[in-house]
Image: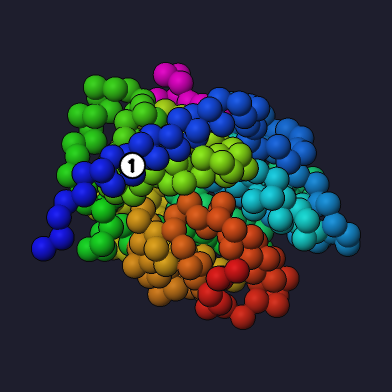
Amino acid sequence: MTAFDLTALQRELAAFQTRVQQSLVTLAALPKVELGTAPREAVLVDGKATLYRYAPTARPARRTPLLIVYALINRPTVLDLQPDRSLIRRLTGLGHEVFLLDWGYPDRGDRGLGVADYVLGYVHRAVQHVTASVGRPDLLGVCQGGTLSLLYAALEPTRIRRLVTMVTPVDFQTPDNLLGRWARGIDVDALVATCGNVPGELLNFTFQSLMPFRLTLQKYLALVDDADEPDKLANFLRMEQWIRDSPDQAGRAFAEFVRWFYQENRLVRGGLQLEGREVDLRRIRVPVLNVYASADHLVPPSASRPLAGLVGGRCDELVFDGGHIGIYVSGRAQQVPVEISRWLSGRGSGRTPAKG
């Protein structure tokens, strides 16, 4: 039996402590990090929401504009986290004229907004603005924004040319959906009655609790390994800044989304109406590209894949070998906008693994 070497353990702990201190010193010396630095202009202010335009940086420019609808939760700056890892910069560099619908920060005055207000109000007005100024757009919906985009495409199928959904939940009750299990167990009406708007900090805590080791302790241990690499530490700070920039959620919309989708699974089972209009995904006959991540812990592939059997037209798939956040910011993620661009131009084959 090997004897326990206390001296070796003490040396390892001392070395670890030294690297922790080195990481803290390097972090403190870094300049302030900035997110969302791609050049843009605000072209429409609609309540708390703002529609931004990003001009193409390559010629010839694509003739069809691309409108991105992000989730209500967290901020779309993850799509432009840093200059060399930016979905938006990559798309404009491929000649796309990109528009982004930024939801802003809802306050108490917005607590009565419902899902219909976001879909048939904000999204619709953004589509109208882009159409009037440039032309009928392609639509890219990200995460929860993909679900909202599906609702819009089902209700207004002639107003867009093509639809891309990215890490988008469709079947909200698959067995491996940890977030779905949590959502099905909460009394959402009591939560909203108590809070009004749902605090972003509460949702952040919930997401981290789904995988506590990976999303908390593991990332800080990895930080120690990067003690002498300022670029990696700056990337860490950018991600931490994005995670903590969590808007509150309009109470009514949050309650409706949880009830209709997580608890009643209406996209799969049917029975969903917005302002008296039935949402039927079979009405979506424009080409659809469904992009999902193979190791996604928030929207597992099983939650996204059913889309192909629900829409009324062609639905191709693009599978990214990574996780929910890695699909935007990892090194190999920069191939994803390339594949999306190829598909939008009619050159994509579908069912293409993006492995960088």
Instruction: Locate the N terminus by quadrant.
Output: bottom left
Which stretch did the figure color magenta? Answer: 104-114
Q: Residue at x 56, y 70 (%)?
A: 354
Q: Quadrant of residue 200?
A: top left
Q: Quadrant of residue 39?
A: top right
Quarter placement of the C terminus = bottom right
Front-most of 27 and 35? 27
User: How far from the left and from the top, in percent, is residue 91?
Assistant: 71, 56
Which structural element holds mark 1?
Answer: helix
Q: Is residue 157 magenta?
A: no
260 and 95: which is toward the camera: 95
- Residue 197 makes an appearance in the image: yes
| Residue drawn at 48 percent across, 51 percent down | 325
Colouring: rainbow
| Foreground pick, 273 / 170 | 170
Q: Amino acid at mark 1?
A: Arg
Seen as rendered, the residue at the extreme right is 59
**Towards the viewer: 133 or 170:** 170
Q: Is residue 277 left or right of residue 4?
A: right
Disc 1 marks which residue? Answer: 11
